[in-house]
Image (cartoon, rainbow, N blue to C red):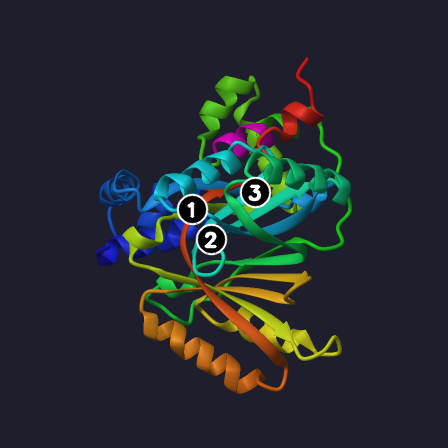
Amino acid sequence: MNRLSVKVLAEIDDDSRTSLSNIAKKCRSSEQMVSYTVKQLIKKKIILGFSTLFDYTRFDLNSYIVLFRLFYRQKEDLEKFLNYLKNTPELSRLEVFDGKWNVYAMFLAPNPSYFNKILQKIRRDNKDLIRSDIIITTVVTYTFTRTYLHENKKIQKKFMIVGGDREISDFNNNQILICRRLLNNPVERIKDISRKTGLSFLTITNGLKALHNRGLIRGFKPIIDFEKADIVCKKIFIKYQSNLVNEDRIISFCKEHQNVVHIVKIFGEWDLIVTVECLKKSDFDDFLMDLREKYEDMIYDFEIIKVLKIAELRFLPKNYFETNYKED
């Protein structure tokens, strides 16, 4: 990517619904050049799509992560399994790994029993492909803006919290219509939402503001092809020395580091998953060394896995509104 492409991508990562004029102002470029750059990022599939960051716990859902290790002798076997998972409505996040585990899949379900039915069906339908799997229960997730893409490295790092102990929210009909549109097309223009829902421009604008203020929608993010963007992405699975570890120390350190884009507090095989993205491999090496030196007394074990790609990303089941809110 050239310099302008990186700057534009950074602004889109901050808010994928932001206007071209706003991006142009921040990048000190023309609106026409920014428009062309965005189109090229999408055409070259550096940006694969977009996702609305719903706080799924406010929709009465919990998240469960499953790591799959597969039997596969050719690429078609992996693609077959990925396509199967993509057609599972409750799938939220799907990543392809390079390592011991092949696939990272996160599912959204109202309770453990519901999730167990999903997983049992996946196992039955893919018994010849799945070698083994590990279930991880999510506690809370921190998603950060990609400050490493900004030229100004002192820029304030924003983060959004999804999950944890949250009250379940009620929705009016207008908010349901808006959320339904944004789940399917996170960057759909307001005038198009208006045309397809019959809601006025002002109603949609006020509805979006209310959804943000109530924490139901946390933001809008691009899905990036790491290989084409020349970005190194790795996950660090951390196991603490004991349950008495003050994990806030590690989390605070990760929050401040420009290359950390995602933190998941979990319980199960590990205690924490830290996702790190870098433009240079040496940046990851520096981060890991710094982490180990500062918190060697707290970390019992860790495992590093390279993320090859994000194959799917959404923060509500794709059939959520059809299942829970029938149209009249």
Q: Look at mark 1 in the image and give the residue it sits on.
A: 72
Q: Earlier in the sequence, mark 1 or mark 2?
A: 1
For the point 57% across and 34% down, which residue is it? 125
Q: Which residue is mark 2?
A: 102
- Circles 3 and 2: CB atoms closer than 8 Å: no
Q: Are marks 1 and 2 in contact (CB under 8 Å)?
A: yes
Q: Is residue 60 above or below residue 181?
A: below
Amino acid marked by disc 1: Tyr
| Left or right position of 10 against 132 | left
Q: Check disc 3 and report the residue beneath it.
A: 92
The correct choice, above or below, for 150 with respect to 322 in the image is: below
What range is drawn magenta here? Answer: 179-185
Does residue 183 belong to the magenta stretch? yes
156 in relation to 169, above or below? below
- Circle 1 crowding by C-alpha within 10 Å: few under 14, some 14–19, many from 20: some
- How far apart are the alpha carbons under marks 3 and 2? 17 Å
| CB under 8 Å between discs 3 and 1 | no
Whether residue 31 is visible, yes or no, is yes
